[in-house]
Each structure stands twice: as structure tokens, then as C-alpha cells.
Image (spheres, rainbow, N blue to C red):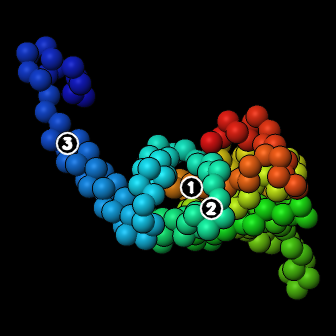
Amino acid sequence: MTDPFSAFDEGHQPTRPSLEVELEAAHTAARDLSARLADVIVGRDDVIELVVIALLSGGHVLLEDYPGSGKTLLARALGESIEDDEEVEGIVPFRRIQFTPDLLPSDITGVSVFDPERAQFDFMPGPVFAHVLLADEINRTSPKVQAALLEAMAERQVTVDNVTHPLDELFLVIATQNPLGMAGTFPLPAPQLDRF
């Protein structure tokens, strides 16, 4: 077995050209993605930069903005710009959930449906199984429903009926909220805010 520190013992600095190449490729991809999004969303370079940073860092984004400001268009363009070399079955580039007062947690995560022919339950994945998920007007639903995203955002998985279903490693939630105080809004609980 080769000693990984042997290069230091001999007074040589190890070279990492592959790391430099990988960093340059990542920088180029981020720059190209930002340019593609800027072609679709004009005049929102600050939001585009924040969304790309969140995507690269494995974070999520919470936007408070006016209707018609291009949030859905931005999320859809980002999802469509992602090329996944290793596709996970059931994961799509983009999904949108309109959060309403009557939304249920299973409307987000998915549900087990009984198949009478095989006499067993089959899991039907919900819209959370996407690379980019737009949680539109997230504060228009109760904290119980908002909490359906907590496991997905923190652990990149969803548990339904005691069975854990993995999400793709590339998973970004772009949530929008209405200003607090508007009729029909609920404040986001601290654990939810912590995910953004």
C-alpha cells in the first residue's frame, strides 16, 4: 500500500490538475446555467444568482415577491436546464405545488394505493419527486402540510407508511410566500424556515 504522505516526506507538493479541471468545469456549468436563466427571466440577476448558489450548495430558496414577477418561470426554466446523467426512476425535472388551505401532506409526498389484482399496496410518488420543486404560496396552508417538506428538504427522502423513498441527490425547493398579514396566510414554523 502506498503511503499518501510520501510525497510530503520527499519534499514534493502533490499536483491536482484534475481538481482544477473539475472546478473549471463546475464554474463553466454555473455560468452557462445563469446565462440560460437570464435569457428567460430579464432583470432579475440577483434572484438568479441566489437560486444558482442554492442549487450548487444543496440549499433551498424562499422568495417573497409579488404575483407575476417570474417565480414560476424561473423555477421551470431551472428544472428544464438540468441534465441528469443518472436518472432516478420517477424523478422529473420540474414540478409545481400550489399550496392551498385544503392541501394534505400526502398531496405532496405521495400515497400508497391498493392494487386489488395483486392484493398489495403500490406507492404513487407525489410532486416532491422532482429535481426542482416550486412550492407556490407555501404560507397559504397549515404548518402540518408545510411540514411534509421537512424530511425531503433536510434528508433528500420521503417516508410514507413507514417506507422510505429516496429523492434524487439533486433536489431544490423554490418556495414563494405571500407577505404575512394577508388574509389566509400562516407563518412558517421555525423548523421550516431553517431549511431555507
Q: Quadrant of residue 125?
A: bottom right
Q: Quadrant of residue 121?
A: bottom right
Mark on residue 78? none
Q: Are marks 2 and 1 in contact (CB under 8 Å)?
A: yes
Considering depth in this image, is 160 or 82 the residue closer to the camera? 82
Q: Is residue 33 visible?
A: no
Q: Nearer the viewer, mark 3 or mark 2?
A: 2
Q: Say which amino acid is labelled 2.
A: Leu
Mark on residue 20? 3
* Quadrant the N terminus occupies: top left
Looking at the image, tell me whether mark 2 or mark 1 is earlier in sequence order. 2
Q: Which residue is mark 2?
A: 133
Q: Is residue 107 above or below residue 114?
A: above
Q: Position of residue 49 (x, y in %)?
A: 42, 50
Residue depicted at x 56% and y 55%: 171
Mark on residue 171? 1
